[in-house]
Amino acid sequence: RGANAVVGGGSLEASSSVAPAPDTQHAVAGMVASINEQLCHSTDTNRFATLFLALYDDRTRVLSYTNAGHNEPLLVRADGTIERLSVGGTIVGAFGFAQFEEARTTLCEGDVLVLFSDGLSEAQNLNDEEYGERQLAEFVAARRTETPNNLRQEIFDEVDSWTGAVERGDDQTLVILKAVNRKS
């Protein structure tokens, strides 16, 4: 049910690990293209994956990312504005010729980035209604001042409340990053 480790220091609090970004332009899209090529050559043609890959530069506060067919992560700005990180391309492992784009965004203090699997957004209640990405985005926006660990637990509690006694049909993975004041 998601990663529990907290990354401190720098300007991010996280429920997963964060790697420093290289200075090379389009590094993320290149890595995704390389992963795609390797998967295409090493797996059956009917096997593929979705992937969201990002690198964060703590010095500039720039997040560089490529979304390869994954659920669009939510970027909830400190003021409550909700953005979707959609730039990228198709799934990986299916098309050896696939091209991938990379985008960059600057994270400011209080911004919250939420990556999630479809098992979370597609969790169904007793009426076969999905929890949904819109409801998840609104929930995160309303609680954007929480710490990543508290927000993670609140999201899981909310989805559990939504589904009630319905058994989960898929994994529920969640990674939360929050931009915080730089420590001197």
Image (cartoon, grey):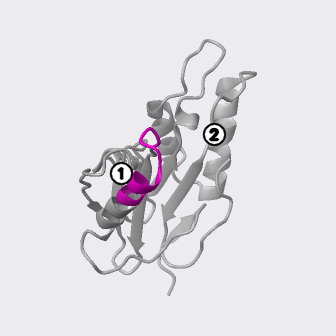
Note whether 132 is above or below 43 in the view shown.
above
Residue at screen point 55% across, 46% down: 143
Residue 132 disc label: none
Label 2 secondary element: loop
Q: Is residue 113 visible?
A: yes
Is there CB contact under 8 Å for labels 2 and 1?
A: no
Note whether 111 is above or below 116 in the view shown.
below
Q: Is residue 133 magenta?
A: no
Q: Is residue 44 magenta?
A: yes
Residue farthest to the top?
127
Q: Residue 38: percent from the left, percent from the top?
A: 40, 60
Q: Residue 124: percent from the left, percent from the top?
A: 60, 22
In this rendering, position of residue 125 left or right of residue 72: right
Q: Residue 78: percent from the left, percent from the top?
A: 41, 55
Label 1 secondary element: strand
Along the polypeptide, which appears first: circle 2 or circle 1? Answer: 1
Q: Residue 24: percent from the left, percent from the top?
A: 27, 78
Note whether 85 is above or below 26 in the view shown.
above
Residue 171 disc label: 2
Q: Is residue 77 visible?
A: no
Q: Dot 2 surroundings within 10 Å: few (below 14), some, or many (20 or more)?
A: few
Name the residue nearer the viewer: 184 or 157: 157
Residue at screen point 59% across, 63% down: 16
**In which image quadrant can residue 57 be found?**
bottom left
Name the residue nearer the viewer: 166 or 83: 166
Amino acid at pointer 2: Asp
Q: Which residues are magenta?
A: 36-47
In this rendering, position of residue 57 left or right of residue 4: left
Residue at screen point 53% across, 42% down: 117
Residue 67 disc label: 1
Residue at screen point 47% across, 50% down: 43
Amino acid at pointer 1: Asn
